[in-house]
Image: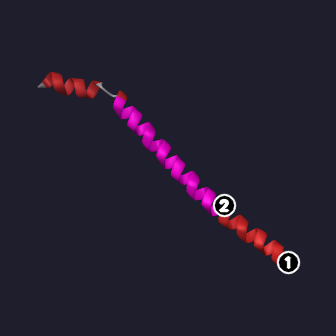
Amino acid sequence: MLSRIGWISVNQRGVTATEYALIIAVVALIMLIGAQLLGTNLNLVFNSVAGDV
């Protein structure tokens, strides 16, 4: 039983890969939300400028 617990605590490769995958997913989600907000704001600015012209 103790040898199994020791093996689980030593095997960290899968855990690290999972953590990196989660970090990448969160960063990608933040980038998508930021691009969406930026696009909406730019659209408003261009429409405002076009209305003034």
Query: Viewed as shown, does residue 35 lie left or right of 2?
Result: right
Question: Which numbered disc covers residue 52?
Answer: 1
Q: Quick check: is 30 in the magenta stretch?
A: yes
Q: Bounds of the magenta span? A: 14-37
Quadrant containing the C terminus is bottom right
Q: Which residue does the numbered mark 2 point to in the structure image?
A: 38
Q: Position of residue 13 (x, y in %)?
A: 36, 27
Badge count? 2
The answer to which quarter of the image holds residue 52 is bottom right
Question: Residue, x 30% and y 26% (percent of image)?
Answer: 11
Question: Residue, x 78% and y 74% (percent of image)?
Answer: 48
Question: Residue, x 39% and y 37% (percent of image)?
Answer: 18
Compared to 17, does 33 lie above or below?
Answer: below
Compared to 26, does 20 lie above or below?
Answer: above
Q: For the residue labelled by badge 1, is the local secondary structure a helix, a strand or a loop?
A: helix
Q: For the residue labelled by badge 2, is the local secondary structure a helix, a strand or a loop?
A: helix
Q: Position of residue 40 (x, y in %)?
A: 66, 66
Compared to 9, does 37 lie above or below?
Answer: below
Question: Residue, x 63% and y 56% (percent of image)?
Answer: 35
Q: Main secondary structure of the magenta part?
A: helix
40 and 9: which one is in front?
Answer: 40
Q: Quick check: is 26 in the magenta stretch?
A: yes
Q: Earlier in the sequence, mark 1 or mark 2?
A: 2
Mark 1 touches mark 2? (CB < 8 Å): no
Query: Viewed as shown, does residue 4 lie left or right of 28?
Result: left
In the current view of this chain or complex, which residue is farthest to the left? 1
Quadrant containing the N terminus is top left
The local crowd at label 1, few if under 14, some if 14 to 19, many if 20 or more residues have their Cα within 10 Å, is few
Q: Position of residue 12 (x, y in %)?
A: 33, 28
The answer to which quarter of the image holds residue 2 is top left
Q: Name the amino acid type tagged 2.
A: Leu
